[in-house]
Image: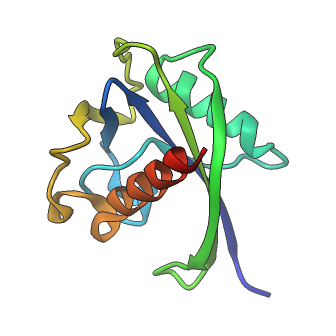
């Protein structure tokens, strides 16, 4: 039996921008530093839809945002556990004031045409891949 991690992340878009965060404690995030999409592991028996809402509210102070699942992926993590990641998106009508939790060191709205370099993004630029995949799906819908 393999260890399994259920994770939700959420891409927050507005006016051709996306929100990225840096966490204070990289140990909670596979010992990674750099920019992330806001994310967290699901709590026991938590529905992924509920986890997306929780992440928005607890980590960013955003409530009542409409989030939708974009896609799900799975892979073997660096710790040999099986990761299942639920990628969500939300589109805000205007740039919201973010009220970051104590776990977040910094948050920044990035123009989609000038995202940070892959070296500055945790997990070898994983958030950049995810943003691109979500944007591709947005164009199709």
Residue 50 position in % (x across, y down): 74, 34
Q: How is the image coloured?
A: rainbow
**Residue at the spot x=79%, y=49% of the render?**
44
Figure quadrant of residue 113: top left
Q: Please state, as top left, top right, bottom left or bottom right, where the N terminus lies in the image.
A: bottom right
> Which residue is drawn at the image coordinates 37% and 23% (left, top)?
100
The answer, for residue 32, to whether it is visible in the render is no
Tally of numbered tags: 0
Q: Identify the residue shown where x is 38% and y is 13%.
A: 94
Which residue is situated farthest in the right direction here? 45
Residue at figure coordinates x 70%, y 72% from the top left? 4
- In this rendered view, identify the residue nearer to me: 24 or 83: 83
Of residues 116 and 105, which is closer to you in this image? 116
Q: Is residue 61 left or right of residue 82?
A: left
Q: Is residue 27 visible?
A: yes
Q: From this viewpoint, which residue is outermost toward the front?
A: 140
**Left or right position of 102 against 6:** left
Left or right side of 91 for 71: right
Is residue 17 placed above or below 78 in the rendered structure? Answer: above
Q: With 74 as the anchor, is 109 left or right in this view? A: left
Rendering coords of residue 18 (x, y %)? 34, 36
Q: Quadrant of the C terminus?
A: top right
Could you say where residue 63 lies in the image, as x and y percent from the top left? 58, 14
């Amino acid at each position: 039996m393999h260890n399994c991690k259920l994770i939700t992340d959420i891409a927050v878009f507005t006016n051709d921008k996306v929100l990225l965060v840096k966490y204070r404690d990289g140990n909670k995030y596979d010992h990674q530093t750099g920019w992330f999409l806001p994310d967290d592991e699901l709590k026991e028996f938590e529905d992924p839809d509920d986890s997306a809402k929780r992440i928005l509210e607890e980590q960013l102070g955003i409530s009542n945002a409409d989030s939708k699942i974009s896609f799900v992926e799975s892979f073997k993590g660096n710790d040999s556990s099986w990761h299942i990641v639920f990628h969500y998106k939300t589109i805000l009508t205007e740039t919201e004031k973010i009220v970051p939790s104590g776990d977040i060191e910094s948050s920044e709205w990035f123009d989609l045409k000038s995202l940070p370099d892959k070296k500055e993004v945790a997990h070898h630029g994983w958030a950049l891949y995810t943003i691109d995949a979500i944007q591709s799906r947005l164009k199709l819908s």
